[in-house]
Image (cartoon, helix red, strand yellow):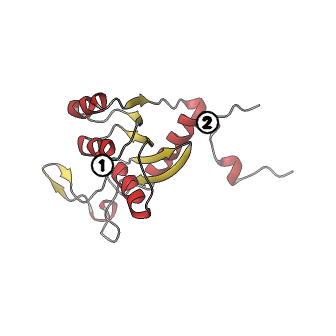
Amino acid sequence: MKKRIDWDQYFMIQAALLASRSTCNRLSVGAVLVRDKRIIAGGYNGSVSGDTHCIDVGCYLRNDHCVRTIHAEMNAILQCAKFGISTDGASLYVTDFPCLQCTKSLLQAGIKEINYIRNYHNDEYAKQLIELKNISLNQIKLDDNILEQVALDQYIHPEQE
């Protein structure tokens, strides 16, 4: 009998799935905001709605940063703002450690927990702020057994009986 994946793994897999929608050439990031074990918003990094995408026309770089891209965490927070959903007390599941600007926004939005898979240019000041605000910070590992277990092939091509 197959064992169910735990909540952290479930939400992190959702974030990874959202990352597959990214329109950034440099790094695909996905984020899910969760409250009471329910997804309240999701986001991926990409352009402002209606603008051209980096995957189509290339990155718009200034000081080695793409200014066209909105980060996944910000897109999730903005989705909540757009639809009037409170983020206070929510948890974040994100594929990559948040940048400093996203960290500051997450803390101001009342996020109580940050879960991530990969370290990515972790900013020391971001870590200090997370510690200052007593935010739970967890690196989630998705091993091959979990990834194999959640394979969607059985749902796409169910066996004939």
Depth check: 65 or 11 in front?
11
For marks 1 and 2, the one nearer the N-term is 1
Residue depicted at x 33% and y 60%: 55
Residues marked 1 and 2 touching at CB (< 8 Å)? no
Identity, as a three-letter code, of the amino acid under mark 2? Glu
Q: How crowded is mark 2: few (under 14 residues within 10 Å), some or many (20 or more)?
A: few
Q: What residue type is labelled 1?
A: Arg
Observer-nearest of 154 and 86: 86
- Residue under numbered circle 1: 26
User: In x, y percent, where is residue 83?
Assistant: 44, 63
**124 shown above or below 34:** above
Vertical placement of residue 143 versus 91, above or below: above
- How many tags in the picture? 2
Instruction: Name the secondary structure under disc 2.
Output: helix
Secondary structure at badge 1 equals loop
Q: How far apart are marks 1 and 2 (CA)?
A: 26 Å
Residue 122 location, quadrant: top left
The outermost residue toward the right is 161
Check disc 2 and report the residue beneath it.
148
Q: Which of 160 and 93 is in front in this view?
A: 93
Residue 18: percent from left, percent from top = 47, 51
